[in-house]
Image (cartoon, coloured by chain):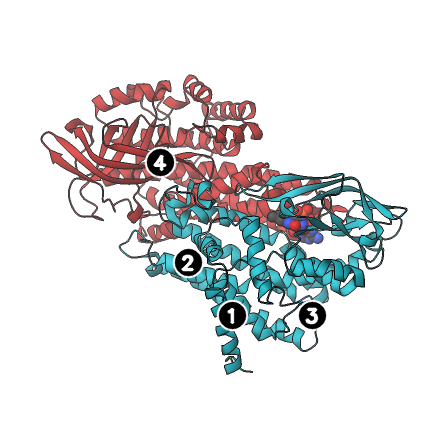
Amino acid sequence: MDFAFTEEQELLRDSVQRFVRENYPFDKRNKLAETEAGFSSENWAMFAELGWLALPFSEVDGGLDGTVIDTMIMMEEFGKGLTLEPYFPTVVLGGGAMRRAASPAQREAVLPGVIEGTTHLALAYAEEQGRYNLADVATTARADGDGFVLNGRKSVVLNGTAADWLIVSARTAGKQGDAEGVSLFLIDSSTKGIDRRGYRTQDGGRAAEVTLEDVRVSGDALMGEAGAGLAVLEAVIDEAIVAIAAEAVGAMTALNAATVEYSKTRVQFGTPIGKFQALQHRMVEMFMETEQTKSLLYRAAMSMDSGRPDAARCVSALKVQTGKAGRFVGQQAVQIHGGMGMTYELNVGHYFKRLTMINSLFGNIDYHMRRFAALDGTTEAA
Amino acid sequence: MDMEFSAEQQNFRDSVRDFFENTYPSDIRDKVRRGVSLSKDDMVRSQKALASRGWAAPNWPVEYGGTGWSPTEKYIFENEMARADVPPVVPFGMSMVAPIIYSFGSKEQKERYLPDILNSNVWWCQGFSEPGAGSDLASLRTKAVRDGDSYIVNGTKTWTTLGQYAEWIFCLVRTDPTVKPQEGISFLLIDMKTKGITVSPIQTIDGGFEVNEVNFDDVRVPVENLVGEEGKGWTYAKKLLTHERTGIAGVARSKHQIGKLKKIASSIPNGGGATMMEDDDFRRRLSEVEIELMALEFTDLRALAAVQTGGAPGPESSILKIKGTEIQQAITELFVEASGYYALPYTPERFDDGSNVEPVGPDFAAFAAPRYFNVRKTSIYGGSNEIQKNIIAKAVLGL
Ligand SMILES: Cc1cc2nc3c(=O)[nH]c(=O)nc-3n(C[C@H](O)[C@H](O)[C@H](O)COP(=O)(O)OP(=O)(O)OC[C@H]3O[C@@H](n4cnc5c(N)ncnc54)[C@H](O)[C@@H]3O)c2cc1C
């Protein structure tokens, strides 16, 4: 048991912190969110230069062999800065699927571009009728000669517009809701039959509705084994949950600091509002909730890193706590800032919005509470 | 004790329902139902329609244009209004400044202002809060200095809701800096067209524009615009704030929203082969809110009955404000939960009437997150919920 970060990890944290400090003053961030792309390509090039885009990939693929914990460190700092670059959809989600299921030829075609910062990815896995159920896939991939023809609709595909490649879950066998029969496909996003309707998201990001209409792909678009895609998706998303929970911990840490600071300087009734015990206790609770989330974050990351059987259950526990803490900390940070907390101009409301969206992604509190209960028996004492 | 409506009350309900269904402008109801934003003109038309039926100001004394309804009739009216998707009356004129004017204003002021408020000819906004004076309103610094027949007003008011539409603003101003803060405050009515007033918009977290900062730079206000006595503004305002708090409970509207949520949830898949309405976890959380609301409905009715038998809306109205806003917030949160992934798309065009932008995902989802974000304001304004708890602790529990 060791909670210390390595020297390299501390350096990584420092460099992300420096990036945020130098490139993410809040007014600049809001302007960036309003641009067409919604992020800065110069920043993205810097990410490539700093090696961040190579971090989780294996050395064979040109990567740095980074761990879940390395990604966690980066995401926590991104969370503090409310950064907009699509690191999460391209490197964590798309990259996560590539690392687990792509063939050598697929890796060769895609990963060098990702690592150099010229290629974007998106994971298209959710569907409207399926809500958070990854197996509820109505999109079909019908075998056709030595290839496949895909038809269906994918919901809220993060980074869906910028993506050069889409990783799409589609059913090659079985019926909607079956665990078996879900396959993953790596598809050039300019392929005929793909329609992408892009839009902004509540938290300043970008996503798209992706429609596939008779999209014809060759047999080597299949990632991994046919019909065995669900296990891959689950693993990718569990890892992604650790990453956005880290982002949430970063956002909550920033909110708590901002709120405590504000309460020391905002004077009402002749005294800083931070002197009122009602607010002190509230801020203590915000702090405790954040610490509890951080504990489950470390627990899930370490469990996943060492491949323990309880990793999935730890992830669901983490997602439940992140949802609860994110809601409480976000709401109370706004509340304690009074009218100021309601303004678009101040970063507080934007952290709150991001935390709200994090709860809506990959299964909300209810969903993960159920999954946690269903996975009972996989957690042993540490 | 009796919960049932009498035959007479049922007739009343039918006539209210009939009015909203057949006489009231249906395009406005339609907009509210679809969730699109109302224009200033819509809000004015809505209130004028109520005024034409004599129903614009149920809470006013009959002599000034009130309806003379019993609490039960008011209750019925509120419910029918919410049920028909008729927007609430903008409170600043009708429920805030008017009661001050008819309670403390001069005969001339009553004659000059009340009819235009009743008939929605003039739009009012509320200029109480300042950058440095929110919860501690008595520390306000906007000053009004007497100069012949005028006051010269200087200072900044903020968070002024819908100030961009307003023709008049009612303000608390400091007329005497030498006495106790509460005793040096006066209540002034100010024409927004007066030279020296600037209104600047403040954008809220949901992306909307409903609040403003209002600056006063050597603004000359005739002395006749002072309401009541100089230095008594604080006493008047306190009375007004109690009124504001009862209105804020919004029980009828929350009931209506819960009904809508149930309908929507019945058509949203839960990802497990059923609908959200059949989802045990979602149902339990919805029920929790509904139970709170059932209790609040009766707390509200009990408070109204107490007023009817001679009591004034007292510190108990703080309960209505706290619980009412918590329930409103919880309902908006459930709409976000019901949206699943579709809470994410930000499509503000959907708020524009006549927008032909196709919804992304289910129709209601575009409004879910922005509402949830926006409604956080309700526990901040009208005396924050922390301040309400301080009031209950002090005035009710005697702590
Ligand atoms: C959307 C919106 C619309 C508004 N519309 C209007 C309007 O039309 N006209 C108008 O005049 N005003 C309006 N207001 C202003 C509103 O009344 C104030 O925001 C409110 O009084 C709180 O003041 P503040 O924002 O300065 O917060 P502060 O008073 O600075 O409070 C900050 C935090 O400290 C807490 N706090 C303060 N004192 C105590 C205490 N003693 N004990 C415990 N906690 C305490 C508060 O509850 C809050 O959580 C509006 C506000 C909003 C957000």
Q: Earlier in the sequence, mark 2 or mark 1?
A: 1
Name the mark on residue B261: 2
Above or below, B338 against A205 in this view is below
Give how far across and how far down residue A269 sits, in percent. 75, 49
Q: Which residue is mark 4?
A: A208
Pointer 4 local density, CA inside 10 Å: few below 14, some 14–19, many at least 20: many
Label 2 sits on what residue type?
A: Leu
For residue B2, say whether it is visible: yes
Colour chosen for chain B: cyan
Label 1 sits on what residue type?
A: Val
- Asked which quadrant contains residue B217, the reply is top right
Q: What is the C-alpha distance between the residues marked 3 and 1? A: 20 Å
Q: Which residue is mark 3?
A: B61
Question: Quick check: marks 4 and 2 in contact, CB under 8 Å?
Answer: no
Question: Quick check: marks 2 and 1 in contact, CB under 8 Å?
Answer: no
- Secondary element at tag 3: loop
Name the mark on residue B16: 1
Give how far across and how far down residue A350 sits, in percent. 53, 39
Give how far across and how far down residue B386 sits, in percent. 65, 55
Using residue B100 as the reference point, say whether residue B269 is left or right of it: left
- The residue that appears at 73% across and 67% down in the rendered structure is B398
Chain at numbered mark 1: B
- Label 3 vs label 4, nearer the camera: 3
Pointer 1 local density, CA inside 10 Å: few below 14, some 14–19, many at least 20: some
Using residue A208 as the reference point, say whether residue B206 is left or right of it: right
- Label 4 vs label 1, nearer the camera: 1
